[in-house]
Amino acid sequence: MKYFAAILRMKDIEKNNLYRPQHIDFLTRNENEGKIFARGRFTGGAGGLVIYMAESHDEAFKLAQTDPYVTHGARSLELYEWDMKFTGNP
């Protein structure tokens, strides 16, 4: 399994607010299916980050682009494979 960082930059705050419930449902569903490692917003309203778990970039991209924030133009999507290193330190 590989990790992929989806950077979701804010494009439209009104659409962001409108589609937030659908976005949260999307995240919750995919977390429950074991497809999301971590997620969170950037402070200051710049957007957020989702770390997907997938076998390939293509698989992760297909999933990430179905996020309602992306499909409705509330946020842009940049996706990068993430070579995670865990140090165990808080």
Image: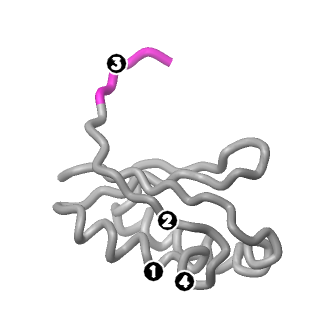
Residue annotated with mark 2? 77
SS at badge 2: strand
Q: CA distance from mark 2 to mark 1?
A: 10 Å
* Between discs 2 and 1, the one toward the N terminus: 1
Which mark identifies residue 87? 3
Here the colouring is one colour
* Between discs 2 and 3, the one toward the N terminus: 2
Q: Say which amino acid is labelled 2.
A: Leu
Position of 17 with respect to 26 (left or right) is right
Q: Say which amino acid is labelled 4.
A: Thr
Q: CA distance from mark 2 to mark 3?
A: 28 Å
Residue annotated with mark 4? 71
Q: CA distance from mark 1 to mark 3?
A: 32 Å
SS at badge 4: helix
Give the quadrant of residue 18: bottom right
Q: Which residues are magenta?
A: 85-90
Residue located at (65% from left, 50% from top): 41
* Between discs 2 and 4, the one toward the N terminus: 4
Camera-nearest label, 1 or 3: 1
SS at badge 3: loop
